[in-house]
Structure formats: C-alpha cells, structure tokens
C-alpha cells in the first residue's frame, strides 16, 4: 500500500473519530480570544467558567437522558461586557437564550434529538455557573 493511501486512511479515520466525539458531547469547539478562560464544560448537567477580556464562543453538544422539561439556571457575576447562554436545536434554531438579566428558562426536550449549548462572550469579565435539571 502506498504512503498516500495510508495517509488518506489515517485522515478519514481521524474525521470519523472527531465526528463521534462531537455528537456524543466529548468534543468542544472554541472560537474565542481571552486573557483568562478557566472552567469546565464537561460536567454532567452543569458548566462553570471564569473569564477575563473574553470575546467569541464555546460550543458543545448536550445530550439528555430522558424526554421531559428541564430548568436551566444561570448564576454568576459579570463585571464587564455581555454573555449569552444559548441552546439550539438540531436545525441550529435558538430555543433558549439566557443572559445575566434573564437567569432561568424552561426547555422541553426529546431525548432522541441533539441539542447544542453555546456560550457567547463579548468583551466579558466575570464568572458563570450554568445548571440544568
């Protein structure tokens, strides 16, 4: 087998691996600039983040174990800038948008569908904690 074919097989294998990591919520997309960004988005039913001079977004797939209504609660202290916590459905339509002014929201989900959690920052300083149950 030629070296080119081996490289093609390795490349396709990596794409398949990344796809499975993404759809199962283990891979996180980042497109942000920040002086400081520390936190965890991998927790079950929660995420906590501290940030300074942060602009951009962080996005991940979230999966729900059962079809029911979930309550999302956003707590935190934003000293500068703005932040939006957005949940999108599989068609990338916004179905929930939380801000420091709108701290709670209800969402009815289908366990068979894929949902996306996105944190959008605009020159923001502070820390947040998002929980859903």
Image (cartoon, helix red, strand yellow):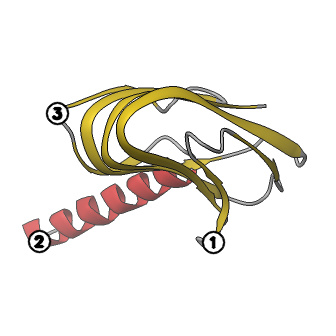
> How far from the left and from the top, in percent, is residue 24?
57, 47
For the point 56% across and 26% down, which residue is it? 43
Kindly indicate whether the residue at mark 3 contacts the one at mark 1 (C-beta within 8 angstroms): no
> In the picture shown, does residue 42 fall above or below 102?
above
User: Could you say which is closer to the camera, residue 31 or residue 14?
Assistant: 31
User: Could you say which is closer to the camera, residue 23 or residue 29?
Assistant: 29
For label 1, the residue is 93
For label 3, the residue is 35
Q: Quadrant of residue 7?
A: bottom left
Dot 3: few (<14), some (14–19), or many (≥20) neighbours within 10 Å? few
CA distance separating discs 3 and 2:
41 Å
For the point 65% across and 45% down, which residue is it? 102
Q: Tell which tag, 3 or 2, sits nearer the viewer.
A: 3
For the point 50% across and 50% down, which residue is it? 84
> In the picture shown, does residue 96 fall above or below 82?
below
For label 2, the residue is 4
Q: Nearer the N terminus, badge 3 or badge 2?
A: 2
């Amino acid at each position: 087998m030629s070296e080119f074919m081996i490289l093609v097989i390795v490349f396709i294998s990596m794409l398949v691996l990344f796809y499975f990591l993404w759809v199962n919520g283990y891979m996180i997309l980042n497109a942000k600039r920040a002086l400081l960004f520390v936190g965890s988005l991998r927790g079950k039913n929660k995420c906590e983040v501290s940030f300074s001079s942060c602009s951009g977004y962080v996005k991940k797939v979230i999966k729900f174990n059962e079809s029911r209504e979930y309550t999302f609660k956003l707590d935190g202290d934003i000293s500068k800038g703005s932040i939006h916590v957005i949940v999108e459905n599989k068609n990338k339509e916004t179905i929930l948008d939380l801000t420091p002014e709108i701290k709670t929201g209800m969402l009815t989900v289908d366990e068979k569908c894929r949902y996306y959690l996105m944190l959008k920052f605009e020159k923001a300083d502070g820390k947040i904690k998002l929980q859903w149950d």
